[in-house]
Amino acid sequence: MEPCSCDTFVALPPATVENRIIFGKNSDRLCDEVQEVVFFPAAVHDNLKEHLKCTYIEIDQVPKTYAVVLSRPAWLWGAEMGANEHGVCIGNEAVWGKEEVCDEEALLGMDLVRLGLERADTAEKALDVIVDLLDKYGQGGNCSEGGMIFSYHNSFLIADRKEAWILETAGKYWAAEKVQGGVRNISNQLSITTKIDREHPEMRNYAKQKGWWDGKKEFDFAATYSYIDTAKMMISPSRYCEGYKLLDKHKGNITFETMMEILRDKPSGINMEGEFLTTASMVSILPQDSNLPCIHFFTGTPDPERSVFKPFIFVPNISQLLDTSSPIFELEDPVKKKPHFKIKLDRRHPLYREHQQALEVIYNKEEKAKTMLDNMKKLEKELFKEMESILQNKHLDVDKIVNLFPQCTKDEIRIYMSNISS
């Protein structure tokens, strides 16, 4: 099993039911890293002379940014995964290959996730945003808070109501594959082979200069830019292969609940345990009917098997997600000081704290654990039923939806507190 990991999935008709695209991701990070779920409203930026500060570097701002909901490691600016008000979803993965990883501080792949969501109203436009920024600013820098140096290149799965794109990078070079039906997943390896729908204009020439491709045989991106034997890619014991098998097994009947089951699967390694573990999860329903709302579920806590998927829907005047937002540290934040990460801060948000205590109950008190897990499943089932009703009846109670995610989070916390204190 890979020492670090993430898995991102997408299923499109005819693999799904009800003409929906289903997106899902597990964010697998260092076991003590807190992931928060945060909302940023749409904004107009009048003063374009002011630069935008990302995790490490400043870049040019754009006149307008879209509303986004993000699941992100609490110490950085970007995100592991998220969605915007137009139904665009993005998740990224760490990948390595023949091209050397740059330690110099540039844009993190997670910064590119957020930038793609804030600046694009379709999946392909998000791809354009990411590759343009990659070309202008590059990718690089430590992707871990603390003493460990952890740098990588990135792959992205970008989806909207109509299609999905796989974007895989090696330094500034990249290839992209359009997905219009069926199932597709990405993990911590390059996976685009000979079906290349868009690419960096110098990608093939660079590979020839490096001696990775002779210019004669059919160009295979993953085989050329990494050490993968793509002929054996679908039969290897990798998480990429295991993830595809889980999608393929349910092809034709995939629902948002199916996607959650996949993210909760431990035997495959998709739901990770150990030094690197699944620190947060996300599943989105993207109906192809634009009259229906997109629904995005987030855990905001580690281990999806012992977490609640809580729904979020974009409506005007969304309440801030206080119970899943980590404390803000201004001047003393070690990300903003050089050298970085000399101290480590307590970034636990209210839900994370209660969930941690609840896990202790689950591990040590069998009877209480059963009661708590049953209550969590009951809450989740009620939420699923409510969301399905919204999609079937095409009716949205906007006043209620404004507080939907915060209220679900409070209900989850209440379950934990009642079992911890009793």
Image (cartoon, helix red, strand yellow):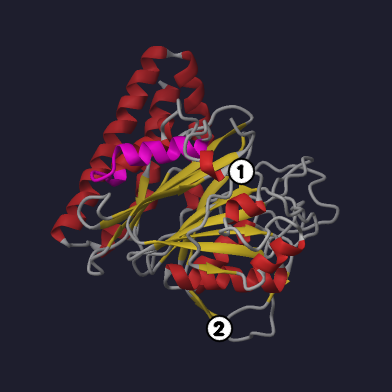
Rendered position, 182 above or below 115: above
Judging by the rendered image, the residue that carries numbered circle 2 is 63
Question: Splitting the image into 4 quarters, where does residue 112 fall?
Answer: bottom right
Q: Residue at x 61, y 34 (%)?
A: 2
**Disc ID at residue 199:** none
Q: How far, Cα to Cα, is label 2 from label 1?
A: 42 Å
- Asked whether disc 2 touches disc 1, contact meaning CB atoms under 8 Å apart, the reply is no
Residue located farthest toward the left when viewing the structure as drawn? 393
Q: Is residue 405 visible?
A: yes
Query: What amino acid type should be assigned to the residue bearing mark 2?
Result: Pro
Q: Is residue 85 left or right of residue 290?
A: right
- For marks 2 and 1, the one nearer the N-term is 2
Q: Label 2's element? A: loop
The kind of residue tagged 1 is Ile
Q: Where residue 111 sits: x, y (%)? A: 62, 61
Other-residue count near label 2 (Cα within 10 Å), few / some / many at <14 / 14–19 / ≥20: few
Residue marked by disc 1: 228
Q: Position of residue 308 (x, y in %)?
A: 38, 38
In front of the other: 157 or 330? 157
> In this picture, which residue range is highlighted in magenta?
239-256
Query: Is residue 254 in the magenta section?
Result: yes
**Is residue 81 part of the magenta span, yes or no?**
no
- Quick one: quadrant of the C terminus? top left
Q: Pick whichever, 70 or 370, lies toward us.
A: 70
User: Residue at point 63% right, 86% down?
Assistant: 47
Q: Residue at x 30, y 38 (%)?
A: 380
Total number of numbered discs in the rendering: 2
Q: Position of residue 344 (x, y in %)?
A: 74, 42
Where 255 sits versus 356, above or below? below
- The quadrant holding residue 279 is top right
**Residue in the image at 26% along x and 50% along y:** 16
